Amino acid sequence: MGPGDAAFLSALHQGDLAEIGAGRDALPRAAAACVMRVGEALLRDRAAVDSAVTTLGGQLRIGLPQGPNPAQNDQLARISRSAGTPGYDTQWLQAQSAANTDALRLLDQEIASGGPGDHAKVVTAAQAARRVVAHHLAMVRACHPLAGATAGSPGPTAQSAAWKAPNGRWSATDASVVVVGSLLVIAGSAWATRRWHRSLSR
């Protein structure tokens, strides 16, 4: 087992727990249907990922944290306090974009490290988790432009300039494209989850 494997599994476990909590928080509070769908996917898929991570941690005798880290807890609490306002969906999606981007970076570092034995088991777990996280990030990005409009805000905020239309406005055509993209990504998320379960059974 590599020297960083314990730290990696601990970080992945905490990320799983934070995403599960975020998904659970969004279901009764989100205004946009697509945000609720992302929340459902997080709750379902990251629970499956974390079940495998916890099992692997036990096999490798790695003690995993009991919950998300303080920063993750504070962020969710702050977003939750905005429930019932137009800002909840946008803040939630921005937080999920950052969290899943960071998770992909962590997973890619572990995958690139390679190695034999127990370390290879950790790398295999990282590869399986990466497929799930990548689909969640795509779901978040597809959902973001609609979330602001559905929740009653003017759309993507200044902090999310990368997701703005070139003229700063979203047309009906733009919205249609995003809706189709969201449906395709949701289907992809289900496919990724099935691949995750198959990889664990090998």
Image: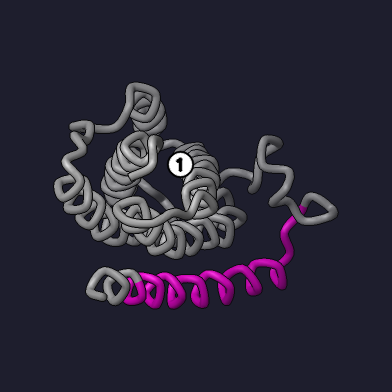
Question: Residue 21, image x and y in percent?
Answer: 28, 42
> Which x, y percent locates residue 45?
31, 61
User: Residue at position x 36%, y 75% from top?
Assistant: 195
For the point 67% across and 35% down, the residue is 159
Label 1 neighbour load within 10 Å: few <14, some 14-19, many 20+: many
The residue segment tinted magenta is: 169-195
Q: Is residue 80 magenta?
A: no
- The count of marks equals 1
Q: Amino acid at mark 1?
A: Trp
Picture coordinates of residue 196, whole percent (x, y)? 33, 69
* Residue 117 visible to an observer of this rendering: yes
User: Relative to 200, is 132 on the left or the right?
Assistant: right
Nearer the observer, 81 or 163: 163
In-front residue for pair 191/121:
121
Magenta span dominant secondary structure: helix
Q: Residue furthest right?
A: 167
Residue 151 visible in image:
no
- Quarter of the C terminus within the rendering: bottom left
Residue drawn 58% across the image and 43% down it: 153
Q: Left or right of 47: which side holds 152? A: right
> In the rendered view, would you say 44 is above or below 82?
below
Say whether residue 192 is magenta.
Answer: yes
Image height of 74 relative to 172, above or below: above
Q: Quadrant of the N terminus?
A: top left
- Residue 15 appears at what percent x and percent y? 36, 41
Q: Is residue 67 above or below residue 27?
A: above
Q: Residue furthest front?
A: 116
Q: How is the image coloured?
A: one colour
* Secondary structure under the numbered disc 1 in the rendered image: helix
Residue under the image location 33 percent in, 22 percent down? 70
Q: Give the residue number, with chain letter if any, for mark 1.
A: 92
Q: Nearer the viewer, residue 182 or 67?
A: 67
